[in-house]
Amino acid sequence: MFDYLANPTRFRAITAVILPLALAITVLALTFGIYLAFFASPPDYQQGDSVRIMYIHVPAAWMAMLAYLAMATSAVFYLVWRHPLADIGARAMAVPGAGFALITLITGAFWGKPIWGAWWVWDARLTSMLILLFLYLGYMALADGFARSERGSKAASLLLLVGVINLPIIKFSVDWWNTLHQGSSVLRLDGARIDPTMLKPLLVMAVAMLGWFICISILRMHTALTERRIHAILAREGDEY
């Protein structure tokens, strides 16, 4: 399946269909999600209206971890099968993934101030999310830090695989250590423990962010493929002269 998609021409054809669908889903989900989050859902009985930050904070955290996992998966395909499109995909997902991690930390600070009385604490989940942001930044620095692109791609891919260990730490940090964060309320084996009036906007906003991530990643991959094609043409013309 991946061999089939790894052909750049075929990839462009398939994503030309996916992109408008993802964009439409993003716009609809974002519009509906904002309405539900800020107008239709009730304030929390303890946190009041500050709980509405959750509808951005939590889906952004989910997407930061999902994007990193997708990049690590691409790294496996690149290191094992040497598919250039896998490397292009990982590079394309790095910027939006880092953006989600940054949004998570910023919204967490705004949420933590009224609830905890501090913008930042060295909570296990906060710290592990900060490490995730550093992994994103480290990946981007390594990928573009070598004169030969292949060396940068290999080093950055290895970093991605090593950094995967941080994902379960983020997820289970509230269970393994005594943290200020509450335990999981949505992704539980025994079902969600959150009121449906709050769960619905949370999931709709997650769909909106996922759609946006797909759109941005595809556009960045198309741009990278075009740049590589231009460089190849220029190099070929240079050899002819």
Image (cartoon, rainbow, N blue to C red):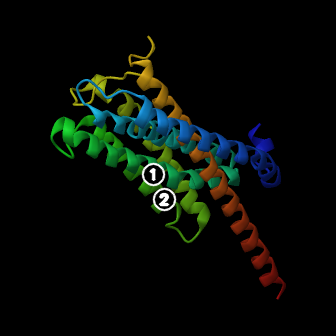
From the viewer's perspective, tell me whether residue 239 is left or right of residue 59.
right
Q: Residues within 10 Å of mark 2 (few under 14, many from 20)?
A: some
User: Can the viewer see residue 203 in this picture?
Assistant: yes
The residue to which callout 1 is attached is 98
Answer whether labels 2 and 1 touch (C-beta < 8 Å).
yes
Q: Nearer the viewer, residue 163 or 218?
A: 218
Distance Cα–Cα, label 2 vs label 1? 10 Å
The residue to which callout 2 is attached is 140
Whether residue 187 is situated above or below residue 61 in the rendered picture: above
Residue 128 percent coordinates (x, y): 32, 40
User: Can the viewer see residue 127 in this picture?
Assistant: no
Q: Nearer the viewer, residue 133 or 182?
A: 182
Residue 137 percent coordinates (x, y): 42, 56
Report the label total.
2
The residue drawn where x is 51% and y is 38% is: 66
Question: Which mark's residue is nearer the viewer, 2 or 1?
Answer: 1
Amino acid type of the residue that numbered disc 1 sits on in the rendered structure? Ala
Amino acid type of the residue that numbered disc 2 sits on in the rendered structure? Met
The residue drawn where x is 42% and y is 56% is: 138
Q: Nearer the viewer, residue 205 or 17?
A: 205
Q: Quadrant of the N terminus?
A: top right
Q: Residues within 10 Å of mark 1 (few under 14, many from 20)?
A: many
The residue drawn where x is 80% and y is 77% is: 236
Element type at mark 2: helix
From the viewer's perspective, tell me whether residue 118 is left or right of residue 57.
left
The disc, 2 or 1, on the residue closer to the chain's N-terminal end is: 1
Q: Quadrant of residue 225?
A: bottom right
Q: Quadrant of the C terminus?
A: bottom right
Element type at mark 1: helix
Residue 93 percent coordinates (x, y): 56, 50
Whether residue 108 is situated above or below residue 157 in the rendered picture: above
